[in-house]
Image (cartoon, rainbow, N blue to C red):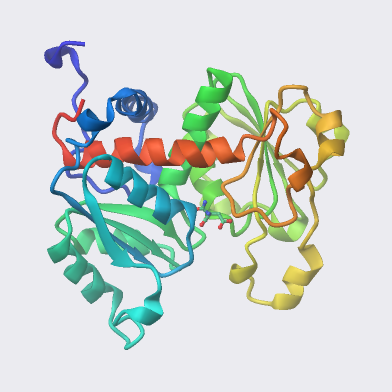
Amino acid sequence: MKPRDMPTNHFFNQDIVSIKDFSRQDLEFIFGCTDRVSALRPNEKAELGKGRTLGYIFYEPSTRTRMSFEAAMASLGGSSIGIFDSKSSSVEKGESLADTIRIMDLYSDVIVLRHPLDGSSRFAAELSKNPLINAGSGSEEHPTQAMLDLYTILKEKNKIDGLTIGIVGDLKYGRTVYSLLYGLANYNVNIHLISPPTLSIRKESIYDVEKKEMKIFEHEELDDNILTKLDVLYVTRIQKERFPDPQEYEKVKGTYTVDSNTLRKAKPDVSVMHPMPRMQEISHSIDNTKNAIYFKQAAFGKELRAALLALVLNENPI
Ligand code: NCD
């Protein structure tokens, strides 16, 4: 494409707080950019973040999100600084989120924040002058996870429209589920939500999703009838840390396990996804099947986040 034919980059210098702020066109632009950035030679890619610094602040544990952002920034030729163990920073002394954000804003060009409170990223984005990316806000949202989930589905199935997608596990506290549902609401898909009644979706958090074309069905059991319909089975972890009562967690832990028996009953080409970390909800015995795409999904996370950073940091990255 000639530069003048390129769609305008609306994301330059913008915050990424909620997937709700992204239209289908926006998402498709990001997916196209992910393809193009991934195809660059390492030296070309390393121009996109040269001399720039990513500042991460993680008030909750993370493996993939933080490391993939850091690896993505390194691949763009930039560097990363940050806090991932609040005990080793002034957060331990009682420094506020607001002051921590203001300081990171002075030292970096883009901030990546994970925090246990809903609304934390919106609040932080209002304070920071530089763009802020939500890497998980309470049980509310995890927008970049949803983008990489959608990108993975697109890569694996060559389309999103027309698919039947099952989402199983902790639908009450799992923030990836809410962002994914809002992302999927841009497509014509059938959704089956499977959870124990105590972990069913929070209706008040998806009320406007239900106005879209997407059809949603709710179930308690992942039975054979549902399994035979699914093109994608998105499995989630029971979010132990968000349970107000540990006894309630004990009642539901280990409710679902996806294993070779599950795969035998499903479509031969069903794709099993998981934002990870997985506990016992996916058996290690299926890791080497063509259906298990959760490691591929984690790999796409780095690619998609590299494209997002390139878009946020450059007016016309590619
Ligand atoms: C998820 C999260 O933090 O919400 N992890 C991730 O970013 N891949 C899912 C989880 O912790 O269960």
Residue 264 is drawn in which quadrant? top right
Q: Nearer the viewer, residue 191 or 71?
A: 71
What is the x, y in percent for residue 70? Answer: 34, 51
Q: What residue sits 51% from the left and 37% below the top? A: 149
What is the x, y in percent for residue 299? Answer: 48, 38
Query: Is residue 209 something one can see in this rendering?
Result: no
Q: Nearer the viewer, residue 278 or 178?
A: 278
Q: What residue sits 36% from the left and 64% below the top? A: 120
What is the x, y in percent for residue 315? Answer: 13, 34
Q: Nearer the viewer, residue 32 or 120?
A: 32
Residue 253 is drawn in which quadrant? bottom right
Asked if 166 appears above or below 175 in the picture, the reply is above
Please give the count of numbered marks on the rendered protein.
0
Q: Residue furthest bottom?
A: 93
What is the x, y in percent for residue 104? Answer: 20, 66
Asked if 191 appears above or below 125 in the picture, the reply is above
Residue 305 is drawn in which quadrant? top left
Which corner quadrant holds the C terminus?
top left
Which corner quadrant holds the N terminus?
top left
Query: Is residue 139 something one can see in this rendering?
Result: yes
Please give left or right for residue 148 compared with residue 69 in the image.
right
Asked if 199 appears above or below 194 in the picture, the reply is below
Please give left or right for residue 150 compared with residue 37 in the image.
right
